[in-house]
Image: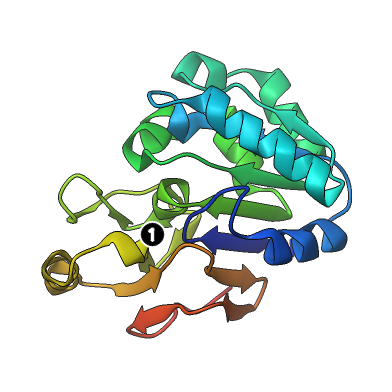
Amino acid sequence: MAQQIVLQGGGAFTANDELDGRVLAEFPGYVAILPTAEAFENPDELIADCHTWAKRLGATIKVCAVYTRADAREESFAQIIADAGSVYVVGDSPIHLRSTLKDTVVFSAVANHQCVVANAGSAAAMCDPMVDPRGGAFALGLGLVRGIAVITESEKWSDDRLQRTLGLANTSVAEIPTGAALIRNDQKWSTDGTVILHGPLPETS
């Protein structure tokens, strides 16, 4: 199955309109929104931004309120994702996203989708290894993308923190600032905006 995965550095629904517009044009249909990684912050604010974004870009959205493992086992949410033109995984807690979605029907629907856009901490969680934001070390991620870790919102990282994380890496690492993205489109990698790569991009299959 051809699949496009877009790993955005940050600014969900506010800083990526040009790229989002291209995604929506290429993958028509409604957009499934998965705000799982924002469960302990303010998902209502993020969802409000999403509705404003959808109106601005002329998109139709369906929000999947998946915040717990029980939610992630619901076939109804998995079906909404499967039937969408694209799925946006948003929110800033990769640890919560991983622990909630791992080995669930909702993650299976995401992993098998034709177009997955993940932003900020959610993008980090899609990778294996995953950068743990609590200290910048590496942890087990969801593995939708393997062989590279991403540092999202990299403009917020101090040089010392960045160098410590890179020093721990045994894999390639991409720095993705807000407004930029690393994209895997089936057999090809590309970047949108200023993405800094440390090491080669993994082979696609």
Mark 1, other Cα within 10 Å: few <14 / some 14–19 / many ≥20: many
Q: What is the quadrant of the C terminus in the image?
A: bottom right
Q: On the image, which quarter does residue 23 sit in?
A: bottom right
60 lies above or below 63: below
Amino acid type for the residue under numbered disc 1: Glu
> Which residue carries the number 1 mark?
153
130 lies above or below 60: below
Residue 35 image offset from top left, x and y in percent: 55, 32
Instruction: List the single residue furthest toward the top.
Output: 70
Q: Tell me if residue 135 can be seen.
A: yes
Q: On the image, which quarter does residue 32 sit in?
A: top right
The front one of 18 and 92 is 18
Residue at x 84% of width, y 44% of height: 59
Residue at x 47% of width, y 53% of height: 123
Q: On the image, which quarter does residue 136 sit in?
A: bottom left
The front one of 104 and 92 is 92
Residue 11 image offset from top left, x and y in percent: 52, 53
85 on left or right of 45: right
Number of numbered labels in the structure image: 1
Residue 143 image offset from top left, x and y in percent: 44, 53
Mark 1 lies on a secondary structure that is loop
Residue at x 65% of width, y 78% of height: 187
Residue 195 image offset from top left, x and y in percent: 45, 77
